[in-house]
Every structure is written in structure tokens, then in C-alpha cells.
Image (cartoon, rainbow, N blue to C red):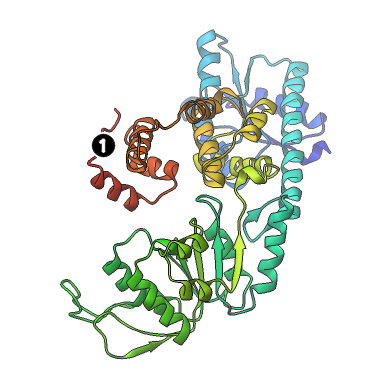
Amino acid sequence: MRRQWQILVVDDEAGQRESMAAWLTEDGYAVDTAASGEQAVELAHRNDYAIYLLDLKMPPGMDGIETMRHIRKLHHEAAIIIITAYATVDTAVTAIKEGAQDYLVKPCNPEELSLQVERILKVKQLQRENLVLRRKLTRQYSFHDMISKSPTMHEIFDLIRNVAGLNSTVLIQGESGTGKEMIARAIHGASNRREKPFVAVPCTALAETLLESELFGHERGAFTGAVGRRSGKFEIADGGTLLLDEIGDISPKLQVELLRVLQERTFFRVGGSREVAVDVRVIAASNRNLQEAVRDGAFRDDLFYRLNVITIHIPPLRERIEDVPLLANQFLNTISVELGKDVTAISEGALRLLIHYDWPGNVRELRNAIERAIVVCRGQELTVEDLGFLNHEAEERSDWSAPATMNLREIERRAIEATLRRTAGNIKAAAESLGIDRSTLYDKLKRYDIRVERGE
């Protein structure tokens, strides 16, 4: 099994370089050598070695620390041992701070070298086995970029398979952050429309007049600034799928126009007189209960019945807590690579904390929490300390109750102010935490005359 591990020995002294290579070859490893940092980087471009043994001083070219920086840019998980003839505390601290796993003092003791290499490779072998296991789990529980162990979610996956080939309208309902757009993309991806466009329109992000133009397009001169004809999202999605996200928030006028499009499959551009015909599958999504909105008179019943041909209810994350470890590890794998951080595991205590948290922001909040924890993590494993902010947020929610004299408007205003304080005035982070779009948050800031004070 050892022959799968490749090691690169880098030293400007031929005798030292060849003796280390010979010893490691006897141990059963495949060994390459380089006489300079530049040559080592060139070899690292062509191969990802399991371990790099780098001499600290290699005049007149790059030294070991500089070579290590170049190698880490190519292979951020590279295991590096620094070899030095000048063993000082400063040398060790510098090497470790720059990312070295360990260091050895010249002349190298062969037994010590073998032990260090074996120790590092044991960890790498465990990481490799863990990665293989994770990939198997991902294949077992995944469906079109989604992953779940929940029986309810697997029923939804089966429903998607059954309805994907149809042209029927689909209504997806679920709390903010549950993954409604991912469900819509999965329906499109499993359908015979998958080679055509998938177009998502956030209905809450635009004012009524702008949303009308966004959906149906406009003719030249239709309004101030309309200097030419522009295709709307219905035309862009022709042959494919159109997602109307948060459809419960559109105006009564647009509800009437949408109803006509769903019935006739034709529409007029804003300012136009010619009907435009399209072949589009419409998927609608809402975090509101549209049946209640119909009862309250806020949503047309005839439009609701047109949308409610096939309904998918996505359960909140707190109702499928078995998905938390699976999702957390998936986010850990992708985000750590995106951020260039060598964080490969979640501690048992941290996992317990994630499982016992109630996730009011659902999967989106879980992803944000993992990203935030990776940013502050100083080791290779997420700990309870890295996720400590979840305890504070849970305490804030459990300790707060609205005074009897406080109306809904005041509750919303205070919730926005508290969230802005917690996010140091970061509008994007505050909007995500509140489960609304940035444009909606800006509208509410203006409505409640809330000033945003950004942190240092």
C-alpha cells in the first residue's frame, strides 16, 4: 500500500538529498528529488506529492519557506517537512506558522525521518478513507445537487422524477432558506427541457412596474429610458423553465396578467400591440401559505388554482434534523476549498451543537454558519468554540418576548435594528439572517427610517 505515496526530497546538497531519498526508497515509498526550490515547484506543477521534504537554506535561489509558499498555492493540503541545520525556536515557529507539518535537524536521523513520514501518512490515509466514505454517502443520499437522508425529502425526490417530464405548473412552498430554487432546478434538470434555459425571477426584488417589464419585456418608448426593445424573462426562458420566486408578494395587477399567460401561453410586451407566444414551464415558489393568502383576499383564488396543479411542500430543517450532519460535512468540503483553508472535519461536540440548534434560517443558515466557523477556525477540525455564536443567537431568541403593548410594525422594526447591530451594518448578512432579499430590507429601512451604522 505504501507505494501509492510519493515523496519529494528537495536539498541543494547532493549527498544529503540522495541519502534521504535512498532511505525513504528502502521504506517502500516512491521518491523524486530536486536540487533547488525552483526545480521543486516545477515538479509540483506536474505532480501532487504526499510529502515534501524541503531544505531551509538553498542559496542562491528560493529558500525552503518561499518554496513552501509556492507549493501550497498549487496544493493547499500539501504536507511539508522543513529540513534545517540551524535548529532554533524562531526557525521552528516560522516553519510551523507558514504551514509546515514539522521540521527535522541536519544531519537527519533516518529513524526519526521514517517515524515522521509514517505519522503524517497515517493521517493522510485516514483523511483519504474519510473522503471516500463521504463520497459514497453523498452518492447514496444525493439527487441533482441536493443531499438528504430524510424520508420526506426522498418522497419529494421521487415526486420530482415523476413530474419532471410533464409540462404541468408546479408550486413549491416552504420557509425561507429551505432550498426552493434548488428543487426547481432539479425539476428542470430532470426534464426534457434541461438543455434549454432555466430562468429565476425574484418577485420581491422589483417594484411592480419594473417586475412587469422584467417578466414580459418592453417595446422602444414604452416608458422613460426604454431606448429599444427588450425581451422579458418569459421570452428568454422559451423552451425551458421559468421560476417565479416568492410569487405570493406580487401585486393584484400582475396576478391578473400572470393568470392570462398561464391560460393562453401568450402575452404583450409593455407598450406592445403584438402577442408573443412562448413554450415555458412555470414553477412558482413562496414562503407564504398561499391558501391562507387566498382566504385573506391577498392572492387571487383562480391564479392559485392555476399554480397549484402539482404542489411540493419542503419541510424546514428542524423537522429533518438527520440531514444536519450530512449537509454540514458537504458544506465543509466545498467551502474549505473555496476559502483555501485546510479544515477537514467537525468535532463530535460541534456536531452535537449543530444537531441541537433549531435552524430558523434553515439550510441557508446552516451553510452560512459553517462558512463563518471555517473562517475563524485555527485548526483542521471545527470545534464548539468555532460555532459558539450559535449559542448566543439561540439565547437571544429564547430570552426575547414582545411586550403586550408592542404592535407588529414595532416588532419588525426592532428585529431589523437588532439584526443590523449583530451584523455590524452588513446589509447582505442582515438580509440573509432575516430571510428576505436585500431590496426588501432597503424598503423596510426606508419605511421605518432606520439609519445603518457600519462597524469598523
From the viewer's perspective, tell me whether residue 16 is left or right of residue 251.
Answer: right
User: In this view, which residue lies farthest toward the top?
Assistant: 88
From the viewer's perspective, tell me whether residue 376 is left or right of residue 228.
Answer: right
- Residue at image position (32%, 61%) is 206
Residue 193 in the image, given as x and y percentages of width and height: 57, 77
Whether 79 is drawn above or below 328: the answer is above
Residue 310 in the image, given as x and y percentages of width and height: 61, 71
Whether 139 is drawn above or below 35: the answer is below
Which image quarter holds the C terminus? top left
Q: Quadrant of residue 309?
A: bottom right
- Residue at image position (55%, 14%) is 92
Residue at label 1? 452
Circle 1 packing at 10 Å, graded few (<14), some (14-19), many (20+), is some
Whether 451 is drawn above or below 102: the answer is below
Residue 231 in the image, given as x and y percentages of width and height: 33, 78
Q: Is residue 436 visible?
A: yes
User: In this view, which residue lies farthest toward the right?
Assistant: 1
Residue type, label 1: Val
From the viewer's perspective, tell me whether residue 218 is left or right of residue 327.
Answer: left
Please tell me which residue lies in front, 94 or 104.
94
In this rendering, the count of numbered labels is 1
Please tell me which residue lies in front, 92 or 145.
145
* Helix, strand or loop under label 1: loop
Q: Is residue 344 visible?
A: no
Please tell me which residue lies in front, 331 or 248.
248
Residue 339 in the image, given as x and y percentages of width and height: 50, 39
Please tell me which residue lies in front, 234 or 9.
234
Which image quarter holds the N terminus? top right
